[in-house]
Image: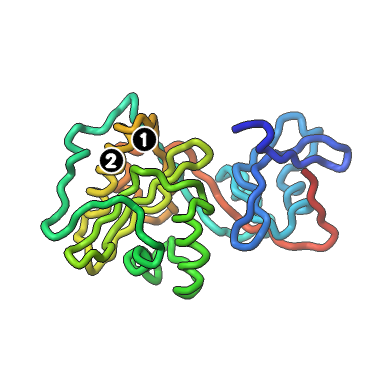
Amino acid sequence: MAEADWVIGRSGDGVPVVRFVRGEREGRPWADLLEVLDGSGGVDPVEFVRTEMPGWVVSGSERFGRELLSRGATVLRHAHTLRRDLVAAPPPADWAGTPLRSGLRATACDRAPEDLFEAWRAAFAPGHVDRFAGDDRQALAERLVPLLAGKAIGPVLPSSRLAVDADHRVVAGVVLTDRDGVPWIADVFRHPERGYRGLGADLLRQAVADATRSGLTEVQLTVTEGNPARRLYESLGFELLHTALTVIVPKQTGGRTRG
């Protein structure tokens, strides 16, 4: 990542303590990819974040997140980033032609968000670890529309795939995006009542094969702790890259931020 992308959090004496990528999440300022810097002059980085970034969302290492939790933060997401190397371990040749069940066909991910919404929403039913807590209108406007417009993570890549039935309804999909130059699988979904079990895996094989054919060297994704889909990804050659905790820092009076 370019140095210009990093924000440096400094102590009152101007000593660099942490660095992060500034964003917004859940309507709050977001310190993504937060790292503790060497030579912080004895400043406690956890206490620094608590006092200088009250109310922020912070994503960093599991260890740092747990230390924040012990001092009053709350969990927003505990997730694992997985990676598949497409050069050292290219997918099998037959992945490109992975067949779908009769009556379904794979298409480009070029439909309107409203066309994907029913299947996407049904895939994350109440109780699912990745269920959006808002109502349908909010889920569409705040999650799916920005994702497909390239505003949530990055532009949607051509290797993305949708499965549609004989009535042209979307029943499943794999959305592959460009996350700051890294091919990123943003979503894999399947309507539980209209798409057969294993359809997500079949589309994912097609998408990974197409990404390889397009010259991409890797694909990455993040899976929430407790999501059984992790077993699927690992069975398709994705390997653990790192684990992160995303937490909400408790609000307190007198805090300020520096960058």
| Of residues 244 and 9, the one drawn nearer to the viewer in this rendering | 9
What is the quadrant of residue 26 in the picture? Answer: bottom right
Residue at 50% over, 67% down: 141
Q: Is residue 80 above or below residue 134?
A: above
- Direction from residue 201 to residue 224 in the image, left or right: right
Give the residue type that dot 2 points to. Answer: Leu
Horizontal and vertical percent for residue 173? Answer: 31, 55
Identify the mark nearer the N-term, 1 or 2: 1
Which secondary structure lies at badge 2?
loop
Horizontal and vertical percent for residue 257? Answer: 79, 50
Residue at 62% over, 45% down: 64
On the image, numbered disc 1 is attached to which residue? 84
Quadrant for the C terminus, please: top right
Badge number at residue 236:
2
Residue at 29% over, 60% down: 190
Q: Is residue 211 above or below residue 121?
A: above
Horizontal and vertical percent for residue 67? Answer: 64, 49
Quadrant for the N terminus, please: top right
Give the residue type that dot 1 points to. Answer: Arg
